[in-house]
């Protein structure tokens, strides 16, 4: 009897993990879509463009404005909606930039740990936990921004945006469909 309780608890924990992982992947897909929008407008998405922590806020604002303008055309957003969306997106980017820097630092720390003469399992685990905490903070902030933006859009616009995201998600690096 005790083993079945432990087994069902383990299954519940696994389901919870996969549920959280699924939510994180959905957020990552949306973030990727925003990055693709920025890339399509001459930016470089998350790697080197408007989200890269530019020291010039005016350049970040300019890139976000360009991305939002392109997106607004695609979903036929009104000028009022555009005015409401801009601060939502800009504030999210401002809030996410330090978290992105934390993720970048953990990558360097991971490289250092893996290239050390002695493997420090406790340090690797601590770094993993830190990275998961940061990823969770990013996921929470992006979810908040998505919900805020969704409240500005009509159901039809949200549907159009979801279709765009699905189209972009199914395409590979050079616009070709991924089949594997």
Image (cartoon, rainbow, N blue to C red):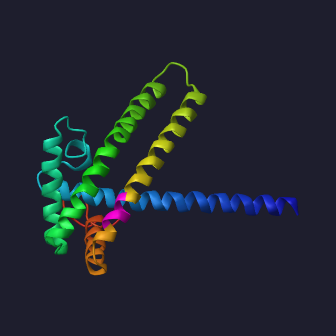
Q: Quadrant of the N terminus?
A: bottom right
Name which residue lies at 73% across and 60% down.
9
Judge from the rendering whether residue 17 lies leftward or rightward of residue 72; answer left or right: right
Q: Main secondary structure of the magenta part?
A: helix
Locate residue 15: give its quadrant.
bottom right
Residue 52's place in the image compared with 31, above or below, is above
Left or right for 146, reference 35: right
Is any part of residue 43 visible from this angle?
no
Q: Residue at x 21, y 69 (%)?
A: 81
Residue 119, quarter of the rendered image: top right
x, y percentage for residue 70?
A: 13, 64
Residue 64's x, y, as percent? 18, 53
Range of residues picked out in magenta: 145-149
The magenta stretch spans residue 20: no
Q: Residue at x 20, y 38 (%)?
A: 54
Q: As rendered, which of 76 and 87 lies closer to the eye?
A: 87
């Amino acid at each position: 009897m005790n083993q079945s309780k432990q087994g069902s608890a383990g299954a519940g924990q696994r389901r919870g993990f996969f549920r959280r992982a699924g939510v994180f992947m959905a957020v990552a897909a949306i973030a990727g879509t925003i990055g693709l929008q920025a890339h399509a407008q001459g930016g470089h998405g998350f790697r080197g463009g408007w989200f890269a922590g530019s020291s010039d806020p005016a350049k970040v604002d300019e890139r976000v404005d360009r991305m939002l303008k392109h997106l607004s055309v695609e979903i036929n957003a009104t000028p009022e909606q555009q005015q409401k969306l801009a601060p939502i997106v800009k504030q999210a980017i401002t809030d996410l930039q330090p978290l992105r820097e934390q993720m970048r630092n953990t990558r360097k720390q991971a490289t250092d740990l893996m290239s050390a003469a002695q493997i420090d399992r406790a340090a690797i685990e601590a770094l993993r936990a830190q990275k998961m905490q940061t990823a969770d903070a990013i996921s929470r902030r992006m979810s908040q921004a998505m919900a805020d933006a969704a409240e500005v859009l009509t159901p039809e616009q949200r549907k159009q945006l979801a279709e765009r995201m699905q189209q972009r998600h199914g395409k590979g690096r050079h616009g070709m469909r991924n089949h594997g």
